[in-house]
Amino acid sequence: MSVDGLTSAYRVDTGEKVRIPPHWLDHPTLGKPFRRTPKSRAADQAHAGSTSSDPDSGTPAGSDLDTPTSGDGDPAAPTETPAAGD
């Protein structure tokens, strides 16, 4: 999406590139004659990936709960057990 609040899309019937409000693409009626451009599709996927959450935990990605700990709650403590003889 750009500064003007519009996103690029292609008209399905003509292939013409147009600028439309992004919420039209998610609407069943308004979005029907349009498809996302590869660039806007990639931007949406990148944005979705950075804000996604783990569906199993319900915790947003990047939260403190994603940080491995040593079991005592200290994220700075090493989590690996040294190999024998080290």
Image: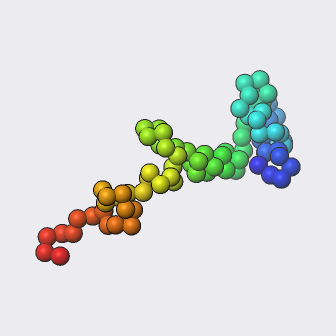
| Residue 59, placed above or below residue 13 | below
Counting every numbered tag in the picture gives 0
From the top left corner, tell me how far across and down residue 80 is, in percent. Answer: 27, 64
Residue placed most toward the observer, 1 or 18: 1
Residue 12 visible in this rendered orientation of the protein: no
From the top left corner, tell me how far across and down residue 10 is, in percent. Answer: 78, 39
Which image quadrant is residue 13 in? top right
Q: Name, please, the residue furthest toward the top.
A: 29
Which image quadrant is residue 37 in? top right
For the point 51% across and 54% down, which residue is it?
62
Q: Is residue 73 shown left or right of residue 83?
A: right
From the top left corner, tell me how far across and down residue 72 is, in percent. Answer: 31, 58
From the top left corner, tell me how far across and down residue 67 is, in percent. Answer: 42, 57
Q: Name, please, the residue furthest toward the front.
A: 72
For the point 59% across and 48% down, which residue is it?
51
For the point 39% across and 62% down, which residue is it?
75
Which image quadrant is residue 7 in? top right
Residue placed most toward the observer, 58 or 45: 58
Residue placed most toward the observer, 13 or 55: 55
Image quadrant containing the C terminus: bottom left
For the point 47% across and 54% down, which residue is it?
64
Q: What colouring method underlies this structural image?
A: rainbow
| Residue 60, placed above or below residue 69 | above
Q: Is residue 70 shown left or right of residue 8?
A: left
| Residue 17, placed above or below residue 81 | above
Q: Name, please, the residue furthest toward the left.
A: 85
Q: Is residue 45 shown left or right of residue 33?
A: left
